[in-house]
Structure formats: structure tokens, C-alpha cells
């Protein structure tokens, strides 16, 4: 049996009468990019900070690489990017990383140039931190997380504040670290489209509790294609469709809209039947739910619908 990179058992965090994270179990394995998804206040940052040893759990156990929580030699195998790191404005990239290398007791000085190349900052290594763009500052934070040559990266909102181009560049960096450097990644972001494009696994957090854990394949299977219809008379459209397709699986949304989950291959027939029944089709497209839509439905955030 494979040893998990990270194992959480019965992990819980309470602040007096407030539960920040309910008792949870979770395992992360080598090679995964696991996305942790949840609204603000769902417990993502609490979970990440407990793994990073920035706060301590009320109860439960964390193991890294099969070793007990807190061992220094194990902790060095994990790189952490949580919130903003403190860098010196008047130092350049090399000087800032050298400060942290000495502070953390990392003997290999050559690692600084290596990580700057990895995050594509080598060209700007002599530039003062105060002159860096937000994207460059995020890259330097990632370089710091890579300083100990970790096997596992813990990334909490690593693309926060970046423009679309900066996000795309960071996304490619994470893929390269995972695929070329074999680094396992646990990542959170409020921009779910970023996670959907890179993650191999999705863990959903709600009100401090893990409510679902899916592989990429399972998520794709659950978000099957459907026909989206916007018509002038949804009630009449439903009557026509039910008469011709007794097994029709559909949902009526607000604004004279429908989602049809089966008979995708019959969309031309559906179009003809509705036209013959004097129902005006304003829009008809084949769609599939994105990660954000799936998450909102999972936590009950999309209640303006009636299923049939």
C-alpha cells in the first residue's frame, strides 16, 4: 500500500465556541494536484495553517510522508505559500532568498539560482523587491516555497490579485512543478476556473467540513452535458417534451429557461417539436457545468430551480 504524502485524521479546530474546522479525514498521494474548494470562512485557510504548523489543531493527527507532525526533517520536504511573505524592499531577489536560506539552515547556496530559474525570475534577480510587479512578487514567494527542494507544495490563494495573464503564467508554473519536478500540490483559490484546468482531484469544504472528495474523472462524469433552452413559454415547452419523451430528465430555471439532461442526441427533434408547438426558442446550446456551478449546486447555492 502506498504511503500518503499527507494524512489528516479526525482533525478539528475550535476557537472557544466557534468551530473553524469540524472533524475531518483526508489523504493526499504522490503526483496529485488537489484543489481545496470552499467559500470564504469555509475552513480552507484554517486547514492549510494547521498543515503548515502555523496554528495547532484542537484535536486530531497530521502525518507527512508517514512521519509524525512536527519533525524538522519532514517539514523541510514541504514548501508553503500562505498569505504574503515578508521580503525586504531594498533587497533584490537573491538577497531576499539568501536571508531565508541562512535563517532556515539550508546549506546549498546554488539552490537560489535554481529556484529563480524555475519560477522564471532569473532575468530580474538583481532588481529590488520594491520595483517588482505583483506577479513577480508572487513568483518570488513561490521561489521561497521551493527553497528547501520540497516534494510537496502547500499553496493558499497563490494567484490572488493577479491579472488573467499572470494567472495563466502561474498555472503553467504549477503544472511544470508537478509534471517535470514530480512535486505534489495542495492548492486553494477563489478563482475556480484556475483550479478546474490543473487539478487532478477536488475536495469541497463547507462550513468547516469536507463534504465531497472527487477525482477529475468523477467530476467530469457528474457534470455531464445537457441541453440549455431559453424559450418564450417554459410551461408549454415542458408539456410538449414530456408528451414525446416520457423519460425526459429536465429542470426548469427562472427566466423561462430549461436544462435537459438526457436525449442530447435528439436536440434537432426537440427543436422541431417546439417549433411545431409554437414555442419560440430564443437560445438552444449544449453545455456542461463548470466547477463553480457544480460547487454552488453542491452547497445549495442554486435553489431557483425545479427538477423533474
Image (cartoon, rainbow, N blue to C red):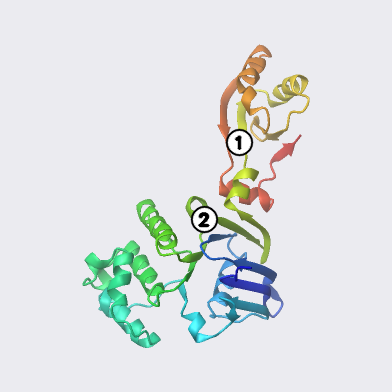
Specify the quadrant of the image occupied by residue 166: bottom left
Report how many numbered discs are placed on residues in the image: 2
User: Which disc, if any, is residue 147?
Assistant: none
Which residue appears farthest toward the top when viewing the image? 276
Asked whether residue 231 appears in the rendered view, the answer is no
Query: From the viewer's perspective, is 241 left or right of 139?
Result: right
Residue bearing the label numbered 1: 225
Which residue appears farthest toward the front when viewing the image? 1
In depth, the one of 148 and 17 nearer the eye is 148
The quadrant of the picture occupied by the N terminus is: bottom right
- Residue name at image x 52 percent, y 53 percent: 192
Residue 215 vs 188, above or below: the answer is: above
Give the alpha-carbon distance from disc 1 to disc 2, as whole Å: 20 Å
Where residue 131 appears, as percent x and y from the top left, is: 25, 68
Where residue 239 appears, as percent x and y from the top left, is: 75, 22
Specify the quadrant of the image occupied by residue 266: top right
Query: From the viewer's perspective, is 188 left or right of 129?
Result: right
- Which secondary structure lies at badge 2? loop
Where residue 203 appears, as percent x and y from the top left, is: 61, 59
Residue bearing the label numbered 2: 199
Q: Earlier in the sequence, mark 1 or mark 2?
A: 2
Q: Residues within 10 Å of mark 2 (few under 14, many from 20)?
A: many
Q: Residues within 10 Å of mark 1 (few under 14, many from 20)?
A: some
- Residue name at image x 39 percent, y 53 percent: 168
The quadrant of the picture occupied by the C terminus is: top right
- Residue name at image x 70 percent, y 39 percent: 305
**Mark 2 and mark 1 in contact (Cβ < 8 Å)?**
no
- Residue name at image x 61 percent, y 28 percent: 229
Residue 116 vs 189, above or below: the answer is: below
Amino acid at each position: 500500500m502506498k504511503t500518503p504524502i499527507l494524512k489528516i485524521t479526525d482533525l478539528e479546530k475550535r476557537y472557544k465556541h466557534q468551530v473553524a474546522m469540524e472533524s475531518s479525514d483526508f489523504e493526499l498521494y504522490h503526483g496529485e494536484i488537489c484543489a481545496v474548494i470552499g467559500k470564504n470562512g469555509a475552513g480552507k485557510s484554517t486547514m492549510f495553517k494547521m498543515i503548515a504548523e502555523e496554528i495547532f489543531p484542537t484535536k486530531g493527527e497530521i502525518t507527512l510522508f508517514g512521519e509524525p507532525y512536527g519533525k524538522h526533517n519532514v517539514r523541510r520536504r514541504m514548501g508553503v505559500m500562505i498569505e504574503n511573505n515578508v521580503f525586504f524592499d531594498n533587497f533584490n531577489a537573491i538577497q531576499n532568498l539568501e536571508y531565508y536560506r541562512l535563517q532556515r539552515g539550508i546549506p546549498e547556496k546554488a539552490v537560489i539560482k535554481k529556484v529563480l530559474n524555475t519560477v522564471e525570475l532569473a532575468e530580474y534577480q538583481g532588481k529590488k523587491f520594491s520595483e517588482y510587479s505583483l506577479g513577480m512578487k508572487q513568483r518570488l514567494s513561490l521561489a521561497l516555497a521551493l527553497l528547501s527542494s520540497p516534494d510537496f507544495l502547500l499553496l493558499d490563494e497563490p494567484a490572488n490579485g493577479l491579472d488573467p495573464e499572470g494567472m495563466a503564467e502561474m498555472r503553467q508554473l504549477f503544472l511544470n512543478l508537478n509534471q517535470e519536478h514530480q512535486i505534489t500540490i495542495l492548492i486553494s483559490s477563489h478563482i475556480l476556473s484556475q483550479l478546474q484546468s490543473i487539478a487532478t482531484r477536488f475536495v469541497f469544504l463547507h462550513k468547516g467540513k469536507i463534504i465531497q472528495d472527487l477525482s477529475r474523472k468523477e467530476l467530469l462524469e457528474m457534470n455531464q452535458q445537457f441541453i440549455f433552452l431559453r424559450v418564450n413559454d417554459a410551461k408549454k415547452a415542458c408539456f410538449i417534451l414530456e408528451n414525446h419523451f416520457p423519460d425526459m430528465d429536465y429542470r426548469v430555471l427562472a427566466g423561462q429557461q430549461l436544462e435537459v439532461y438526457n436525449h442530447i442526441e435528439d436536440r434537432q427533434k426537440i427543436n422541431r417539436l417546439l417549433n411545431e408547438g409554437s414555442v419560440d426558442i430564443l437560445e438552444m446550446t449544449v453545455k456542461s457545468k463548470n466547477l463553480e456551478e457544480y460547487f454552488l449546486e453542491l452547497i445549495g447555492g442554486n435553489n431557483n430551480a425545479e427538477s423533474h
